[in-house]
Amino acid sequence: MNNIEFICPLPNGVHARPAKEIELRASQFVADIKLVNKTKNKVANAKSVLSLISADILLNDECCLEFSGVDTESAHAFFTKFIADELAGIDEKIESISHTKINSKQAQVLPVFLEQSAPKLLRGTVASAGINAGKAVMIKPVDLLTLASNYSTESFNEIQTKLDLGLKTLAERLQNQLTSAEGDTDNNETRNIVEAHLKIAQDRELAVALSKHAQTMANGNNTMRTIALAYRDICGPLEASSSKYLRERALDIKDICLQLASICYGVELVTTPKIDSDTIIVSQALLTPSQLLALPKESIKGLVMGEGGTTSHTIILARSFAIPTLVGIESLTDIVVANQDLVVDAIHGVLILESNPQTETFYRLEQDKLARIEAKNAKFKHTTVTTEDNQRLDVLANIVTSEEIVGTLNVGADGIGLFRTEMLFCERAVPPSEEEQFQHYVSVIKASVGKKVVIRTLDIGGDKPCDYMGFPKEENPFLGYRAIRMYPEYLSIIESQFRALVRASCAGEVSIMVPMIANLNEIRWCHELLAKVTSDLIQEGYTIGCVKLGVMAEVPSVVYLLKQASDYIDFISIGSNDLTQYFFACDRGNQAIAHLYDHLNPAFLAFVRDIITRAQQVGIAVSLCGEMAADEKAQPLLLGAGLRQFSMAASKVASSKRRLSKLNTGQCKTLLNNVVDLESGTQVASAVEMFLNKRQALPTLDTDLVFTQRDVSSKAEAIKLLTDNLEVNERVPSAQMVEQAIWDREAVFSTALGFSVAIPHCKSSHVMHNSVSVLTLNEKIAWGDDVDVDLIIMLTVTDEGKDTHMKVFSKIARKLMHEEFRQSLKQATEPSQIIEILTNVLDA
């Protein structure tokens, strides 16, 4: 018997998705393959998803793969490489909402205004962020074992016949769902989850468990009871796991068992409620994924569940559908009743059971703030970005699969700057066909509707192996046999990719980019291959459009090839991640030398500037992809170096567009010329911060901070209105934090000055720009100390702005003693009038 011992590197342990990947690989071999959890003394069949899940394998558990039977040596060799090179990468940490959006229900601090409004509420844990209102629709959990008593006894043959037909029908239903989802480019998560469910439905372990209980001769046994007992057997180890994440995986198996029971009895055990208006779904148990998928998403305004964490497949679907979701609310269905009006606040972690006018005002302001922030981002989504000095920029996105294209373009990307094609080739037994590749490439180009699309050819090798390509094990794969270097040996695979890419040009311009170029011969080879493929396709009768050829600039030697290469290529894309590590001879994954990996290092910045300059001198277009493209400190330096095309993660596009539009390329060039003479990346970062603060400093007085003649009902509403506005105008990162600072100062003494005027104020690290906010009211409101006010001037000052704070405060306070001055402010109808009045005061 051959064994492979290893430590589990998977952050979430072996749940459904990694189990599916392991099962796919194990099923290629005839040999018996067992995965042993030595830490918990559990053994799993590596060819069964359910068995693998039930082994309760968590991060850092000691494991062992055992092989026996035919082709043991081949299986052993395959899995030795798989564990060393791929296992850690087949799953990623499932992120909860960031700490600014999710906190434990004990720790969450409510905004002052919301707390003061004192609604009746329940605390929960945010699982999918957002705020929405609707009427409660209750969904009750289904217990198969309890239901079984309602059905008559059945013989073993009757049970087995029902089960066989039920499993076959269930697999067909899931396969049909998967086929239907192939055209849904907006929701990858739905496809991934349905695919995992199909694996469970077809799993041998489920069939064995069902068959075992079908043979039970106990009185009252029937198909329903058989399914219930099989579920208990399979999910028992998961529900007993110390991992909350793995406990949540039992929900997928419950989902399959409920669907199977429904098919076997021809009834819908999980009924979908009738929904024809804005609805909040309320359930004590965590909904199964199929339950959520069956609901009309356009009417579901929120989910509230008594059970569950933040990583189940149901929660992943809720996030993908942007449904605000709270979980972990005790005794939920004992408190909430059907048709009750609810507000799901999945930002502050509360379910509002009974509102009041003040609470309604809070949420009106909160929704207004969120809408205004979204509107500011939206302005940059689908517009051409130009710098302050009218230099046109392209902010492109990086993608890994063709399914990402619609969502990527929807967030405002100006095109695709890097389509990594490795996912088409990896994790499969044979390479994709030309036609399969063509369909992926052409779908991206069609969806892009004339926007730039750069598709990188296969970047694979010792560090990203494909088993069917048989790469040798290398001591240093990053510097070894990879990318362009292996193309001649695997010519049929590479030629097939080139053919698919050139064919895709029938739908629009295609930019083909080749990775890891180090010398001119490699460029010539690619140019000749492209010419041959194009000629062959034309002779075969294909319609060919515009095709451009480019290379990744990631090996430092490429900078000195550009003049000669200009005869063969149209563009380069600087791969900042690899170029940085090759420039410093520094493995970016090695923590011992991580300090060397620094794209803000002056020497590296000078090198990048040299690449861009040399490329532009010979007429080669330049873009940059990698982490550096979205780095707020690197962006002005790249602009200064002459870069005009940035490619980054789609989530960074809108914010990068906004930042870049505020920069001046001439000033950025001066900045770059100054920082390349500094001594370290730390000094560069400080210099850029000073530059940005000076460039983007906001005036203390601004019409955007003024509200005139408004109807406000309370002091709390007034403070929230003004602090929310600071967040919208990017003067504070969190309105809630500054609101709290204002109220902390109010707790020391009231800021009502008499004369119907209040000057709330704070000095806080949460303030980024000194600001004077003004609010004039149509009717007076109570401020405290028996003072009613209709003029509010709020001062919010940075930690460094103490002198400014006192100067502004004293000047305004002295002037407010004069009736004429007060009346001029109160009677102003336009923000500009108030700014003019205050400017005269502060400049005096």
Image (cartoon, rainbow, N blue to C red):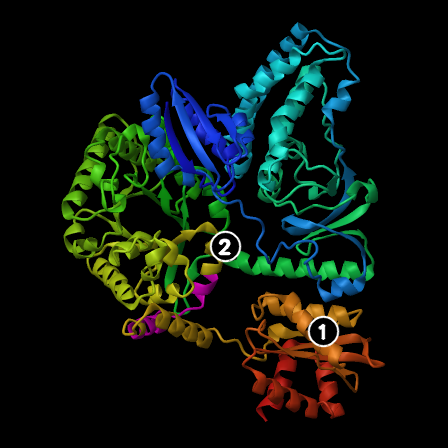
Mark 1 / mark 2, whichever is N-terminal? 2
785 or 838: nearer the viewer: 785
**Stretch of the chain drawn in magenta:** 657-674
Where does residue 55 sit, x and y in percent of width and height? 53, 31
Where does residue 479 sit, x and y in percent of width and height? 23, 46
Q: Residue at x 64, y 45 (%)?
A: 323
Query: In the drawing, does residue 490 fall left or right of residue 117?
Result: left
Quadrant where the C terminus lies? bottom right
Where does residue 341 sit, x and y in percent of width and height? 80, 47
In this picture, is 608 found above or below 56? below
Query: In the drawing, does residue 433 fall left or right of residue 179?
Result: left
Q: Residue at x 73, y 58 (%)?
A: 363
The amino acid type found where label 2 is placed reads Lys
In this picture, is 106 found above or below 212? below
586 or 498: nearer the viewer: 586
Q: In this view of the protein, can residue 25 be seen by the observer?
A: no
Identify the residue at the far right of this view: 786
Quadrant of res 215: top right
User: For numbered disc 2, what is the local secondary structure?
Assistant: helix
Where does residue 661 sit, x and y in percent of width and height? 44, 65
Rendered image: mark on residue 381 = 2
Query: In the drawing, does residue 172 fall left or right of residue 740?
Result: left
In this picture, is 448 found above or below 659? above
Residue 705 covered by magenta stretch: no
Rendered image: mark on residue 743 = 1
State how far apart marks 1 and 2 are (Cα).
36 Å
Q: Residue at x 59, y 44 (%)?
A: 319
Quadrant of res 26: top left
